[in-house]
Amino acid sequence: MFDFTATKLFPSRPPRTMMCLGLGSPGARRRFGAAMLSRHERQVLREIEQFVTEKDPDFAAMLCGGPTRPPRHSRRYQVVAVAAIAGLCTVLLGVLLAEAILMIGGACMALSAWLRVLVLRWADEN
């Protein structure tokens, strides 16, 4: 756990990282509600943000870079879509082949039964 006792208390203006995240902006109260965090929780959050800003300015700068949105046409989704279509085609092909195999097997059984009847009739006649 971090020790935040040595950090400075902030003035009334929110820190830059909160402004970057949109939490300290004037419209944040309207967007998130007036009583989102208690005073103590806001103070602890400010201390954490100050600590992170002091200890890792690169990370804080990354947070201030603005919201990032994943690309719409991500490669991962394309791969998943192709895999899903290939899977459905494989299932459909398996069903069709299974039906064809069953059809051929049934025809072979019917033909062998018919030939057996013919052989038995021929044997009875002779």
Image (tube, grey):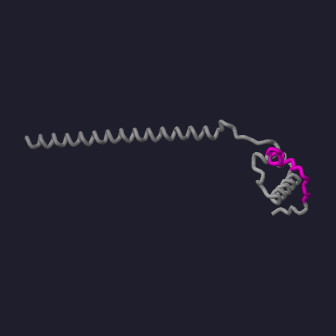
Q: Main secondary structure of the magenta part?
A: loop
Image position of 22 (left or right of 77): right
| Residue 22: x %, y % from top left | 80, 45
Residue 100 versus residue 47 in the image, above or below: above
Q: Quadrant of the N terminus?
A: bottom right
Count of all numbered marks drawn on residues in the image: 0
Residue in view at x 44 percent, y 38 percent: 93
Image position of 72 (left or right of 47): left
Residue 11 versus residue 86 in the image, above or below: below
Q: Nearer the viewer, residue 57 or 26?
A: 26
Corner quadrant of residue 40: bottom right
Residue in view at x 85 percent, y 55 percent: 46
Q: Is residue 82 magenta?
A: no
Residue in view at x 79 percent, y 46 percent: 28
| Residue 65: x %, y % from top left | 81, 42
| Residue 75: x %, y % from top left | 65, 38
Q: Quadrant of the C terminus?
A: top left
Q: Nearer the viewer, residue 10 or 122?
A: 10
Corner quadrant of residue 96: top left
Residue in view at x 16 percent, y 42 percent: 117
Q: Is residue 53 at all visible to an observer of this figure?
A: yes
| First to last magenta residue range | 7-27
| Residue 9: x %, y % from top left | 90, 57
